[in-house]
Image: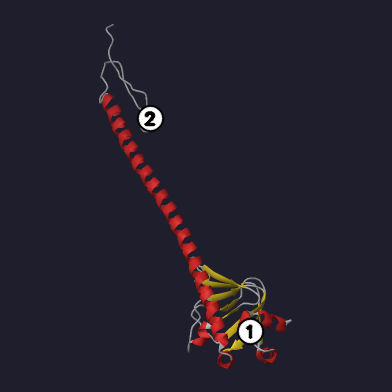
Amino acid sequence: MTLNLLAKIPLFADLPANELDRILSVLNVKKLIDREILFREGDTGEHFYLVMAGELEVLMAAGQMEELQLNIMRAGEHFGEMSLILPGGHRTATVRARGDATLLSLSRVQFLDLTQKYPELSTSMVRVLSQRLDNTNTQTFHDLTEKNKQLQTAYDELKAAQAQLVEKERLERELQVAADIQLSILPDELPKVDGFNFGARILPARQVGGDLYDVFLLKD
């Protein structure tokens, strides 16, 4: 089953069967559970991986609010070569299991020996990396476009809210002017008449009410 998987992987498709057997003899099996981190962005790369079963997420800013999914690695795909090609190279992204997964791995020394023995592997890897870069650029463009739309929507909503706030403040000023006018109509002092006491109080239900009061003398 493993041999068939290796033979179907484009990276190894042109290698002779005996070399596939030799590779199998040095491959290590790595099992991951759901959401387990294989390595993190910035870690020093020491292994090249082949996905035997399951799926893995390739992420930037993993576990943070701005987490971005760059790719999904599935059975038959490989990753981790970039950090092995460069001496002391670091992982450029975080890889996390998406469900249970099984991987096969080669150490840095084994990987470099294999590429030196079969230079055509380097050409195949460059082709795969170029395709990944193109896919990542496309995905990033779509993500940025979507984020720009969200920002524009948020800006429009903020602008509308600001306009509503300005209108609310204008109405409140006009209501205050109306309230001041209403109070100015009311008498400042009530008349003093022997044998009578007058009192008045006005409490508008809102800022401005519809009622007024006054006290005045009739002829008789």
> Viewer-proximal residue, 87 or 212?
87
Q: Position of residue 206 (x, y in %)?
A: 39, 32
Q: Is residue 172 above or below residue 116?
A: above
Q: Identify the residue at the far right of this view.
A: 1
Q: Position of residue 49 (x, y in %)?
A: 60, 82
Q: Is residue 94 above or below residue 108?
A: above
Q: Are marks 1 and 2 in contact (CB under 8 Å)?
A: no
Compared across the picture, whether 195 is left or right of 139 comes to left
What residue do we see at 49% from left, 62% from top?
142
Residue 12 got which mark?
Answer: 1
Measure how far apart labels 1 and 2 are at the Cα level.
Answer: 86 Å
What quarter of the picture does the C terminus occupy? top left
Quarter where residue 78 is shown: bottom right
Quarter where residue 80 is shown: bottom right
Q: Is residue 165 above or below residue 84?
A: above
> Viewer-proximal residue, 111 or 162?
111
The answer to whether one can see residue 44 in this image is no
Q: Which residue is mark 2?
A: 204
What residue do we see at 29% from left, 33% from top?
177
Q: Residues within 10 Å of mark 1 (few under 14, many from 20)?
A: some
Amino acid at pointer 2: Pro
Mark 1 or mark 2, which has the lower sequence index?
1
Mark 1 or 2, closer to the camera: 1
Q: Position of residue 164 (x, y in %)?
A: 38, 42
Q: Identify the residue at the far top of this view.
A: 220
What residue do we see at 38% from left, 48% from top?
159
Q: Position of residue 165 (x, y in %)?
A: 36, 44
| Tag 2 secondary structure | loop
Amino acid at pointer 1: Phe
What residue do we see at 47% from left, 64% from top?
141
Compared across the picture, whether 161 is left or right of 138 comes to left
